[in-house]
Every structure is written in C-alpha cells, then in structure tokens.
Image: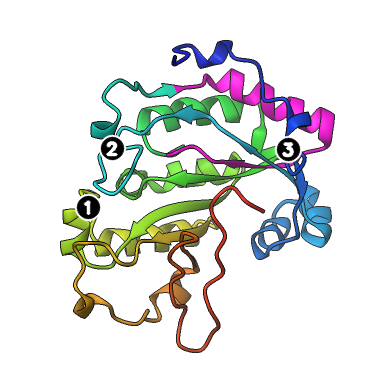
Amino acid sequence: MLGPNIDALPYVNRAFLPQDPYQAAPTAADQRLAARRPWLAAAARSGHMEANIVGSRGCPYNCTFCGAAVSANPDVTIRVRSPQNIIGELDQLHDEYGVTAFRFVDDLFLGVGRVIDEQMAAFTQHRIGDRYVWDATGRINVLNRLSDSDLDRLVANGLREVALGIESGSDRILAAMDKRIDAAMTERVARRLVTHGIGVKGYFILGSPARPKTTWTPPSATSATCGTSPTSTPAMSAPASSNSGPTPVRPYGTP
C-alpha cells in the first residue's frame, strides 16, 4: 500500500546501508566550485562524504520506454516531500555522518517548475548552498523554461550536477519515445547549465525499437564543448568519442 503522506515516514535508517553514506573521490566539479566557495577547498582535495536521498516518488511524464511512466502506473500518484522534511534529513545526515554532498535519486527531482520554486525558496531560507552541494535528475524541457536567474538560484543553493535523460540525438526517435524534447533543446539546455557552472551528465538509450541501424552517428564535438558526461545503463554501454576508451558504466546514485 502506498503511503500518501511520505513526510510521515521515518528517515532511512542508514545502519542497513553499509555503502551509504560513502567517501567519494574528489571530482572536477568539486575543484571548480572550490574556486568560488572557500569552504569546499577540503572536498576539492579529498572528496565529500556523500549520501543518496529521495525527495519525491513517481514521475508526471509518459516516456514510452519507462517503467515509471504515468500510463504504466495508473494507481500511483506523484508524492513530493516537503522542503522542511528534506532539509531535516540533510541536516541529520550531516550531524550523524558528516555528509556534505547529496545525490537526489528520484525519478525526476527537477521535473516540475512549481516544485523547484518551492524547494529552492526553502533551500535559500536555510542557506543550504552555504553548507552542502547536491546532484539531481532533471527534465530537459522543464530546465529549458528556467530563466538565467533561476539557474543562478539553483547554483547558489548548492546544485553541483544534473543528470539529463537525453536518450537520443534523433528527433524522430525522441518523438516516438514521447520525450517532449528535441536535439536542439537538449544542446541548448546543456550549454546553459555548463555556462552557469552546473555539471551535466547525459543518459542515452541505444537499441531503441524505433531506431534503425542507419540513425547512429559518432558523437560530435558537442559533448566536449558542452561539458557533458555520457553515461549508459549497465546493459547498454555506449561508445565514447573516437579518441577515448569505453564509456564508464555508472548508474545514477552510485559512487
């Protein structure tokens, strides 16, 4: 049975998760942020203590390949934790384990403009960006509608990296997937995020039933200029650019 009021649920007991929180290795994003935030200097050298967290359950979209699609879950309502409840767990993890970086592993944390606005207002009030950094999943067409000031607010509130469901560079395949995006929108959003200092990770689906073999073209210089990080699911490791090795397989939410 679904718990309609997920704020009433206790925080996850991390004693049952021996690998979470975990000590993460320092990343290029940590080093970049440390140049503007002196309190991140130690993390830039030795990495953050990181933890995974879920801020919402369900997804309002209907991508044809996804088990979380609305049409595949007619009895499941979208449930979002209150900002105060989320912040309470962030602070608890910091107090008990020294966690300073978080990964929101929701189906889609940055997926509804109204919810983003509500969460960021609370993050600003509690000065989350002065204490923590966080990564999240994001919806391309929603991020496309955010203004530059909205993106700056996300950064000020600690956003370090966004994982985007890019899926394909073919507009025909994206339409068949009901993604409600196109390749030009994806590139525009990725460039804007990187320009604002936000790291970008891209997820791609290879072997979609809608994709004939002739649609594959090698990655262009776009991924390098946008600063995107190609990532694939464990079952489908995508080829990286022609001058590099295989794309590392690292599902979202894993160190």
**Nearer to the camera, 146 or 60:** 60
- The stretch of residues the image draws in magenta is 80-108
What residue is rendered at 47% in x and 78% in y? 240
For the residue carrying disc 2, how many other residues have a C-alpha within 10 Å: few (<14), some (14-19), or many (20+)? some
What separation in Å lies between label 1 and label 3 (alpha carbons)? 39 Å
User: Tag 2, which secondary structure?
Assistant: loop
**Nearer to the camera, 42 or 49:** 49
**Nearer to the camera, 172 or 47:** 172
Q: Dot 1 corresponds to which residue?
A: 177
Give the amino acid at mark 1: Met
What separation in Å lies between label 1 and label 2 (alpha carbons)? 11 Å
What residue is rendered at 67% in x and 25% in y? 12
User: Tag 3, which secondary structure?
Assistant: loop
What separation in Å lies between label 2 and label 3 (alpha carbons)? 32 Å
Position of 104 compared to 4: left or right?
right
Percent from the top left, x then y, of residue 201? 49, 59
Determine whether label 2 and label 3 are within 8 Å by CB.
no
Percent from the top left, x then y, of residue 156? 59, 42
Comes first in the chain, label 1 or label 3:
3
Position of residue 55 relative to residue 227, above or below, is: above
Checking the image for residue 131, the label placed there is 3
Q: Is residue 137 magenta?
A: no
Percent from the top left, x then y, of residue 180? 22, 48
User: Tag 1, which secondary structure?
Assistant: loop
Comes first in the chain, label 2 or label 3:
2
Give the amino acid at mark 3: Arg
Position of 1 compared to 48: left or right?
left
Percent from the top left, x then y, of residue 4? 44, 12
Checking the image for residue 5, the label placed there is none
Q: Dot 2 corresponds to which residue?
A: 61
Determine whether label 1 and label 2 are within 8 Å by CB.
no
